[in-house]
Amino acid sequence: MPVRAAPPDGRSWKRNLVFVWIGVFVGLMGANFVFPFIPFYIQELGVSDKSEVAFYTGLTASATGLSLTLTAPIWGALADRFGRKPMFLRALIGAGVLIGVMGIAQAVWQLVLLRFLMGAFAGTMGAAAALVAASTPREKVGYALGTLQTGQFTANMLGPVIGGLVAANLGIRESFIFCAALYVVAAVLVYLFVREGTPGGGAEGEEPQHHASGGLLENLRVVVKERQVVLMLLLLFVLWLSTTFVRPVMPLSIDEFAEGTANGADRVHFEVFGWEANLKEEAATGLVFSVIGLTSTIAAFALAPLGERIGYRNVVAGAALVTGILYPTVALAGSLPAFMLLLGAVGIFQGAMVPGTNALIAASAPDGKQGSAFGLAASMQSMALLLGPIGGGLTSGFGGIGMVYVTIGVILVGASIAAALLIREPKGFGVTKRAEGVR
């Protein structure tokens, strides 16, 4: 019978959260860090035809997503068996080493293979969420996972910007080494300062003694037997899909606002509060993504107090409903400021959906099986990253750009109704916890 860890004290879980957040930020920034210059690196590796460059760029992204989808549940189950801190360190070190090796690749097939291996050995967010959920007092899990999610949003927002600047100043190959060094620093900080918890109530600071808690397949089987967890994993897939589904067409929407200038270049006119500018399409696209990242980060911070007040299930269902209603209005935007304002509003509610669902997964997962649950959650995210852009592209091809926003809006409204009807608030969690306290 597995020995459960003693609950962490008030200082240790907060310290854990700080350094795990750093690890998540670095780990996910690394994934975004190299994104801006991957096409240029592929050209440096000898591919000159633009269509082939586009093909290999997409292939490197798909390779990472595919391997992460396949391996995330395995790593999650191993975390329940051998410890969540070792799995988080494995994700940071594995990704860091492989990114460093990418900097010395000599052929494009080597880059594709390394990206596939990176997905197989990474899985930073799933490992981090399992570690935080298992080492945080139950009543603080929503707050902790909401805070952790801000690391992902911030990394998504800043990663491409920082990566582009480093590549421009140091060089493409050197930027891979720079990124790998960041992973090493994050791994050292996690190793030194994060404590997973000591089974049997040992002294603070001791390394946990990991006990086998069932075989790999048995751990996964226990999790998928929980109807509530399965429903929330499906909901999580839809919520991530809402992000990846529209991503391919957003630059195309911005392109519709562009106008030719005297020198023949396309510029997007931006005017707000009397200030105006003509932005390059790339700059306008980056600005829109930054706004979404900012509003999503703010929403993630607001998740915990709202979840404790009205219930995390209600927060997720309500956020999905409002996001589903807002998305079709994006198709009606007639200017860049309107487009940005509507997507910023989408980001506010979208930012509460994923961390809210993760909090419900953490509260509903069987004891000692958080790693398996969040491994499956990471797999759902990766699957959405694989299928979302394909679905959005096909929808745009058949029905136009506007139909993409309408379609995902309908899907989210359906997900909201399903969440309200089928998912229950876990006992002793959120609004249920408050009601018990009153009694």
Image: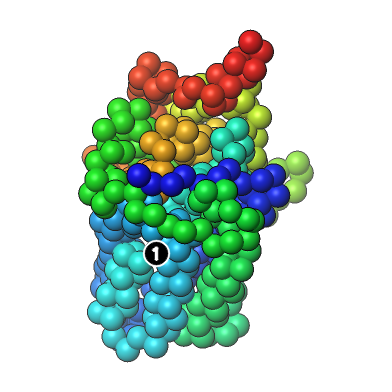
Circle 1 sits on which residue?
Answer: 122
Q: Quadrant of the C terminus?
A: top right
Q: Nearer the viewer, residue 152 or 212?
A: 212
Left or right of residue 324, residue 189 in this image: right
Q: Residue at x 54, y 62 (%)?
A: 207
Q: Nearer the viewer, residue 301 or 285?
A: 301
Q: Is residue 190 above or below residue 341?
A: below
Q: Is residue 27 above or below residue 100?
A: above
The percent position of residue 142, horizontal first and vertical second, equals: 57, 36
Name the image quarter holding residue 20. bottom right
Q: Amino acid at mark 1?
A: Ala
SS label for mark 1:
loop
Q: Residue at x 39, y 29 (%)?
A: 412
The percent position of residue 201, horizontal first and vertical second, equals: 57, 48
Q: Nearer the viewer, residue 268 or 370?
A: 370
Residue 429 appears in the figure: yes
Q: Nearer the viewer, residue 370 or 175?
A: 370
Q: Residue at x 61, y 46 (%)?
A: 8
Left or right of residue 66, residue 373 in this image: right
